[in-house]
Image (cartoon, rainbow, N blue to C red):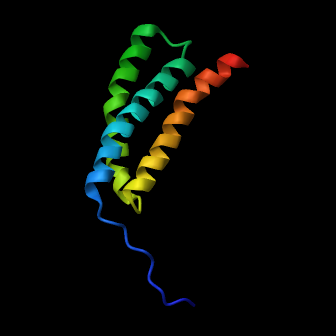
Amino acid sequence: MSTTKPKAIAPDWLSKTLAGTLLGFTLAIGCTGLFSWLASDMALSIRGQLAMWMTAPIWMGILSGVYFFRSGKRAWAWLAVANLLVFGLPAVSRLI
């Protein structure tokens, strides 16, 4: 059994907060856009309202969870990759 302690979460709050604020917002917008794209059979008035009201809880969830990353660099990297996936999925599906 190993007696080494796990690496502590680094306290670079500013970098994590900026990552969650900026990339978290774009990720929340992308997630609601993806929802709207996938739920295209739903009435536009309902789908638009759902997408609009889903943005804030998704963004706040990302902003809350960003502090679990070990460093600000990891938060930026993971959120950037998540943004690329969310915004790239519809673009790639149009090519297919």
Image coordinates for residue 18, horizontal then vertical, percent = 30, 45
Image coordinates for residue 23, horizontal then vertical, percent = 38, 38
Q: Is residue 65 left or right of residue 85?
A: left
- In this view, the residue in front, 41 or 32, is 32
At a point 46% along the width and 30% down the height, the residue shown is 31
Q: Is residue 83 left or right of residue 63?
A: right
At a point 51% along the width and 13% down the height, the residue shown is 42
Image coordinates for residue 45, horizontal then vertical, percent = 40, 9
- In this view, the residue in front, 21 or 34, is 21
Find residue 7 and report its image quarter: bottom left
At a point 51% along the width and 25% down the height, the residue shown is 34
Image coordinates for residue 44, horizontal then vertical, percent = 45, 9
The quadrant of the picture occupied by the C terminus is: top right
Relative to 27, say whether 79 is above or below: below
Find residue 92 and report its image quarter: top right
The quadrant of the picture occupied by the N terminus is: bottom right
Q: Residue furthest right?
A: 96
- In this view, the residue in front, 28 or 80, is 80
